[in-house]
């Protein structure tokens, strides 16, 4: 745990779903509380809705996703796993973290700053042409199929 305080973990049942959430207890000292480390922003949460499992970095997001799952139409019978990603959101997150990505590239691949910046910029530029992606795993008695869709801007 590298000296980081342990999580406070809670499990509860809400509207027929099981919610397991973890969070750091806020520091007792008000001065420390204002300058709390970044881990205090996360509240990893797992929600079990019927046969669905939601894993999120925050409890509020997990509960919002659980509500959407309850309202969505019934899934296709043979679909085992379905993953959808909004790549414009991913691009925004990566843009916000460009400097750490460059640093990580330099450390892991041994590139100089110019080469690392070029590689990360190439990745970000490629993502700018994509809108969304979806991956679906379907299984029936006689076959398993994987479908991957990519939506361009």
Image: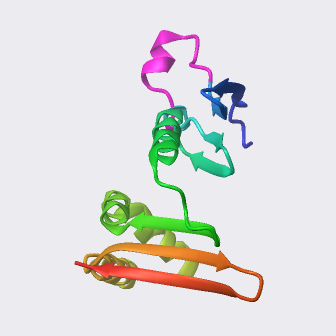
Check the picture and name the quadrant holding the N terminus.
top right
Location of residue 143 (image quadrant): bottom right
The mark tally for this picture is: 0
Q: In the rendered view, does 129 fall on the left or right side of 110?
A: left
Q: Residue drawn at (37%, 77%), measured in percent from left and top?
A: 120
Out of 70 and 114, give the one closest to the viewer.
70
Say which of 137 and 7 sits in front. Answer: 137
Q: How is the image coloured?
A: rainbow
- In x, y percent, where is residue 21? 64, 32
Q: Quick check: is 27 in the magenta stretch?
A: yes
The quarter holding residue 88 reads bottom left
Q: Is residue 25 above or below residue 117?
A: above
Q: Position of residue 146 (x, y in %)?
A: 59, 84
Give, as a single range, the part of the protein colored magenta: 25-38
Establish if 56 lies above or below 3. Answer: below
Q: Camera-side residue: 46 or 36? A: 46
Q: What residue is at 69 percent from the left and 31 percent from the top?
A: 7
Task: Please give left or right for residue 50 compared with residue 109 in the image.
Answer: right
Residue 137 visible = yes
Q: Is residue 110 visible?
A: no
Q: Position of residue 65 (x, y in %)?
A: 48, 44
Q: Nearer the viewer, residue 61 or 113?
A: 61
- Give the residue at x 60% y 40%: 44
Q: Residue furthest left?
A: 153
- In this view, the residue farthest toward the right is 141
Left or right for 124, reference 24: left
- Magenta stretch containing residue 22, yes or no? no
Choose top left, top right, bottom left or bottom right for residue 49. top right
Q: Residue at x 55, y 46 (%)?
A: 56
């Amino acid at each position: 745990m590298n000296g980081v305080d342990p999580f406070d973990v809670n499990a509860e049942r809400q509207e027929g779903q099981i919610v397991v959430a973890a969070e750091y207890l806020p520091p007792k000292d008000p001065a420390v509380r204002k300058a709390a480390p970044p881990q205090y922003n996360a509240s990893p949460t797992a929600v079990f809705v019927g046969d669905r499992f939601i894993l999120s970095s925050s409890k509020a997001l997990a509960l919002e996703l659980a509500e959407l799952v309850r309202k969505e139409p019934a899934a296709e019978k043979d679909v085992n796993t379905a993953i959808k990603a909004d790549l414009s959101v991913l691009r925004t997150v990566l843009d916000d973290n460009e400097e750490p990505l460059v640093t990580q590239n330099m450390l892991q691949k041994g590139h100089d700053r110019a080469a690392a910046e070029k590689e990360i910029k190439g990745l970000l530029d490629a993502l700018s042409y994509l809108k969304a992606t979806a991956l679906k795993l379907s299984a029936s008695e006689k076959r398993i199929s994987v479908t991957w869709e990519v939506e361009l801007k």
